Image (cartoon, rainbow, N blue to C red):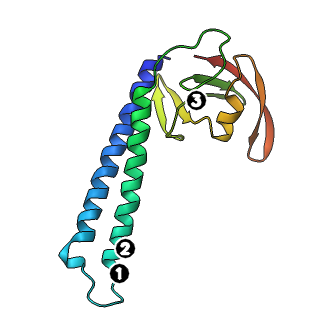
Amino acid sequence: MNKSTILALIIEKLSAELKLLTSAALATHAEATDEENKAEDKYDTRGLEASYLAHGQSKAAEEAALALAQFQALPSRSLAAGEPISLGALVIVQNKGRSCYFVGPRAGGTEVEVDGNEILVITPQSPLGRQLMGRKQGDSFQLDLGGKRSESLIVGVN
């Protein structure tokens, strides 16, 4: 799997998410400030509710913009053989099946597909990220899955 392709797909997905969040925040802001949503009495909270929603959506758009900027600044270099897992690593873990992870600075949970393989973005702060950071190909570790501990093996690091 080509890391440049993976990184480009993540950036493309984050760009689309940012565009969607930004347009939603702008539309909600317009609704919150619209003359028709002005309170008619002290119990009318439509405008207030819309402003809270607009604020939340603008915060989500800010987070998406930050994630996008950090992924755009992330170098797409391959790790040398025996180099420990760090930010920007592509990690393949063998458990009951094979799982592919990209260690990113943000946007944990983002998924992209490359060559029929699902790649999940994890962050170093996530439970799995904490388990993987600093380990190397060939290392094994314990992973809690559904309340059960299972042995996992790092079969590839790039």
Amino acid type for the residue under numbered disc 3 = Tyr
Label 3, residues with CA under 10 Å away: few <14, some 14-19, many ≥20: many
Residue that appears at 60% across and 9% down: 80
Q: Are marks 3 and 1 in contact (CB under 8 Å)?
A: no
Q: Residue 127 location, x and y as percent?
A: 68, 40
Residue that appears at 38% across and 68% down: 52
Amino acid type for the residue under numbered disc 2 = Glu
In the rendered structure, the answer to whether residue 37 lies left or right of residue 131 reads left
In the rendered structure, the answer to whether residue 107 lies left or right of residue 92 reads left
Q: Residue 2 location, x and y as percent?
A: 47, 16
Mark 1: which secondary structure?
Answer: loop
Amino acid type for the residue under numbered disc 1 = Thr
In the displayed structure, 51 sits above or below 148; it is below
Q: Residue 3 location, x and y as percent?
A: 48, 19
**Which mark, residue 49?**
2
Q: Nearer the viewer, residue 144 or 11?
A: 11
